[in-house]
Image (cartoon, rainbow, N blue to C red):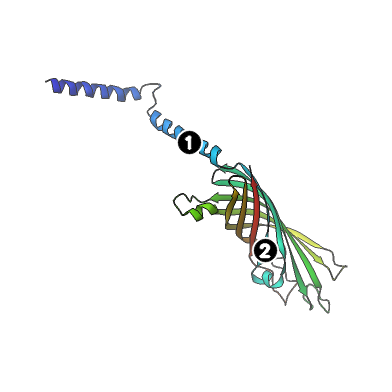
Amino acid sequence: MLILSGFSMAQDQSFHDEISDFELGGDIFSDFNEEIEATRILRDERFFRYSRFFSFEISLGFTAFDGNRGSAYDNQNPTFGAAVHYFMESNLTMGLGVAFSKHAMLIEEPTRGYPQEDGVGLVEVDLFRVFYTIRYYIDTTNLGTAITFSNPYLVGRAEYWNETNKFKDQPNIEDQKGGGLGFSFGLGLEFPIEFKEYYLGIEFLAHSLNLPDEYTQKLDPLYSNLTGFGYSLMFSFTQSW
């Protein structure tokens, strides 16, 4: 009887605790909320202790193309770049940047758009782009030391390309200017020189671009158009705060 009485009292107390959770003003998710809050606080503490907040990078590298544009262009490397990044999380950044590369075309025979007997000659091409970029740093906690040290990340960009064609051998032809939107995706590595302050980086990107002369017929029959994807390999120096 004593055992049954104790069991009955325990049931009554349990039932009373469950009922109290549903009473007006009660919170059945209080334990869950406390756990989420503790996790958020721990994440914020780790971010302020180990992460970077802003970074500024300057870069130098190469830009090339495939397709007809790659066949027509002689790439005048290096490519110059600069960007600033803001760390939204320890492994996620957004940023703004610019890049500039020079290329050249040598047209030595008449074409549909340039009927000169010896062709239009040397055409210098300046490609300037402004971009918005997002980086996602891959979690390498359970990987080897070398991979963790290299800080690998994935990168995506929305870009605006501005193109200027300068006819160096035909001063009577005005410069041709125009622009178009593009997107790029790639990956990169960042090697720390001094933790949270200075880094050396390498980044490879594949660019899908839409330049105004992409489907030009002016270079026919040499080139039926100037389609092609772009590729860039950039080496950077980064200072972080």
In the image, 24 versus 39, the foreground residue is: 39
Q: Quadrant of the N terminus?
A: top left
Residue 232 picture quarter: bottom right
User: In this picture, is 197 found above or below 202?
Assistant: above
In front: 147, or 34?
147
Secondary structure category for the residue under label 1: helix
Q: Residue at x 13, y 20 (%)?
A: 2
| Residue name at image x 85 percent, y 67 percent | 173
Q: Are marks 2 and 1 in contact (CB under 8 Å)?
A: no
The residue furthest right is 172
Question: For the residue carrying disc 2, how many other residues have a C-alpha within 10 Å: few (<14), some (14-19), or many (20+)?
Answer: many
The dot on residue 42 is 1
Q: Is residue 123 above or below residue 14?
A: below
| Circle 1: residue type | Leu
Q: Quadrant of the C terminus?
A: top right
Instruction: Report helix, strand or loop for mark 2.
Output: strand
Q: Residues within 10 Å of mark 1 (few under 14, many from 20)?
A: few
Q: Whole-Å distance between the Cαs marked 2 and 1?
A: 43 Å
**Residue 161 visible to the viewer:** no
The residue at 67%/70% (across/down) is 70
> Circle 2 is placed at which residue position?
63
